[in-house]
Image (cartoon, rainbow, N blue to C red):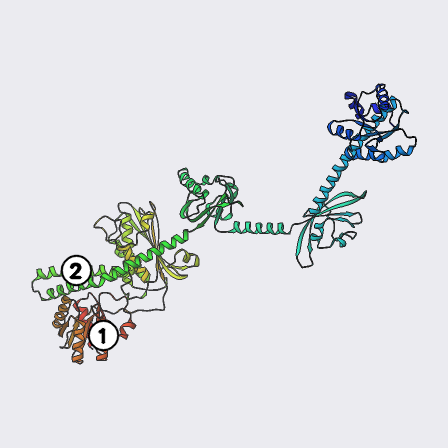
Amino acid sequence: MISGSAWSNSPAAKMHKRRGFRILLVEDNPADVLILQEVLEDVKDFDFTLKHVSRMSECLTELSCEQYDAVLLDLGLPDSQGEQTCVNLKKAFPDVPVLVLTGLEDEEAGTRALRMGAQDFLRKNQFDGALLGRSIAYAVERQHIASELRNKTRQLAASESRIRQIIESSADAILVVDREEVVQFANPAAEEILDRRMLDLIGRPFAYPLAKDSRGEFEITHANGAVRIVEMCVVDTFWNEKEATLVTLRDVTVRKHNEAVLKRDAEILSRLRDAIIFTNLEAKILYWNEGATKLFGWSAEEMRGKSYLSRYPREEHAAIMKRLERMRQGHAIHSERAEVRKDGSRVWVEALAYSTQDEAGKPNGILVMFRDVSEKRKLEGQLHQAQKMEAIGTLAGGIAHDFNNIMMAINGYTQLASMASTQPEVREHLETVMRAGVRATALIKQILTFSRQQPLDRDTTKLYDVVQESISLLRASLPSTIEIVTRLEPAVPAVLANAGQIQQVLLNLGTNALHAMKGRTGHLEFCLEPFEVDSHVADQNPNLQPGKYVRISVSDDGHGMDKETLERIYDPFYTTKPVGEGTGLGLAVVHGIMKSHDGAITVYSQVGVGTTFRLYFPVHADRVVHVDDASAPVPQGNGERILIVDDEESLLLLGQKTLEMIGYQAEGCARVQDALDRVRQDPERYDLIITDETMPGMTGMDFAREVVKIRPGQRIILTTGYSAKLTPDVIEEAGISALLPKPHSINVLGALVHEVLK
């Protein structure tokens, strides 16, 4: 029993002093009920409110409806007898303290009641108010403590269950190792991570050194050969009241692999030559690789965190925002455009941009990739230029035949008329026509030269002499305001070239330079030097191959050319000169001549500074080509029979008259088939056949082959307005004795006929 003072200071006593005790008395004897009421009224320290019922069933009903601090229970009730009464009550209401009232004398009945759950027992008529009050107070206090203990025990059990569940379900291995490093506890994950059964773990030494600095990392090789990377964390703890170590192991193999992959991918992205930029949906730059730094000039530190728009001029922001909005809507944008650099210049790039998505498929950023296509565009431009020149060349070759036929008729008949005329004034007029015809013929040759339709006669040439002669010719037209500067290396290697055409190139470039310096003082510089093209220079100009060259540079300090002009300077008929001062064929011819010499031409120009052309000639000292002289006087014939085959009536008549005038018997035939019939009828009739190449029904080459079949060894001269495809091997295979280009003079025709007939 507790003392009155101890009870008075207890939490339960303080609580009940405020509100008193509500007591339920279960007693079927009215006399005992009166006694208990009187006894409780004598208690001074506490207020008791007593409620009386006489049956166990009433007690259970009352406790179900009302709250009571204690129950005074008589064991001898009509509907419940003995200790079972106490058992039934505690089973129904375990938190209500029960004090048993008994009239029995033996202590055993009270003891059994206590074992059945009663807080105390009192013998009727053997207690006073003080004892009863203390007993009730003690029972309430003890029941309160017991209830608290049960609650704490339940909470502790629940907490322990949760902790055990967490430990057992943890993916990390959790072990307890004592000071002798013997495993005392291990969760299921330890079996999987350490690849050992629980029986081989508990009670066995821990097989790995404990981390010295709380954390560590080591590798485990499983029975199947798999190597796992394990991270260890250790902390001090207690186990069975002894010092121990709590060891946590985590399998970080996948994480380490992913980290390695991410690191590798980051290195790859940083080393890519392509520029890669990643932004969030608000266009804030989150990633900027090394390729972007190399391409645009800004470093990652400068751009990370800035707006994507920050590197563009303000006037371009609206267009860029439209592109960004399209990407946010899921559209990919592929384009080729000029992007701005840090220094303000522009670089041509191929751009691919699209939005990225998160795991839910929602846009979470924008990825932009740029590839430098400057070199590609440069090569495409060169290819376009080459294709354009080739197309123009094809056109030039197509018109050359007809044009040369016309010039052949004009020049030939004019020469015949001049030779036949005895009037000086008429002869003078005819010679003027012939000079115009010669200029027209030269123009056709220029067209065929830049299109590479005109065959070149080239010989071993010393460019030093050619440059000197060209400078001498230019000095005659040089104004006093222009000074010629020369830097010529006399000992440069010889090249394989047509000296006349190289002189034409230099005179053309010199004339253009003088025009660029018109009306101002200036310098015209010629430089001649040996030059070796390395791989770097060759990469800059696909028309050059690594090797030894002779280089001629022609420079002026005139007005220079802008980018648009530079792109078109080699176009035929393109000129910046006023009407009447240029045909626009000059640089086109220069380009064609250099190409036909297996060389190259480059140009550098800056507006307001000047222009430099550089000519590259490959060294070919071991090759020699001889040029025949066709300027000798016309030898006379001895009445030899000659058949002329040409579909142009005017040229057919011209040929007959010319040959007859210089001593031959000439017959004309306008149709190839008629000519073949004549040969078949009398194969030995003709000493020589002169045939045009381009005719309807059959070419001159095919006609020659048929004639040779009929009469092997027949002498044949082939005439043509252009001879791009007529190589020496092809001509010899067809049985042709000589090739005669159109237009030609009577002197050239007479000399060639005489040579073939010999």
Q: Count residues near mark 2 (Cα–Cα under 10 Å), then give few for <14, some for 14-19, many for 20+.
A: few
Rendered location of residue 655, percent (x, y): 15, 69
Residue 471 makes an appearance in the image: no
**Residue at 73% over, 39% down:** 159
At mark 2, the secondary structure is helix
Instruction: Between label 1 and label 2, give the one nearer the viewer.
Output: 1
At mark 1, the secondary structure is helix
Q: Does 260 sit left or right of 712 as displayed?
A: right
Query: 18 above or below 756?
Result: above
Task: Looking at this view, name the residue that lies furthest to the left.
Answer: 423
Residue type at mark 1 is Ala
- Labels 1 and 2 touching (C-beta < 8 A): no
* Quarter of the C terminus within the rendering: bottom left
Q: Quadrant of residue 501?
A: bottom left
Question: Foreground: 701 or 736?
Answer: 701
Q: Which mark is residue 704?
A: 1
Q: Count residues near mark 1 (Cα–Cα under 10 Å), then give few for <14, some for 14-19, many for 20+.
A: many
Q: Does 666 sit left or right of 143 as displayed?
A: left
Q: Earlier in the sequence, mark 1 or mark 2?
A: 2
Rendered location of residue 266, percent (x, y): 55, 49
Question: Foreground: 325 or 673?
Answer: 325
Distance between the alpha carbons at the discs numbered 1 and 2: 34 Å
Residue 344 makes an appearance in the image: yes
Q: Does 696 sit left or right of 150 as displayed?
A: left
Q: Which residue is mark 2?
A: 435
Task: Looking at this view, name the residue that lies furthest to the front.
Answer: 78
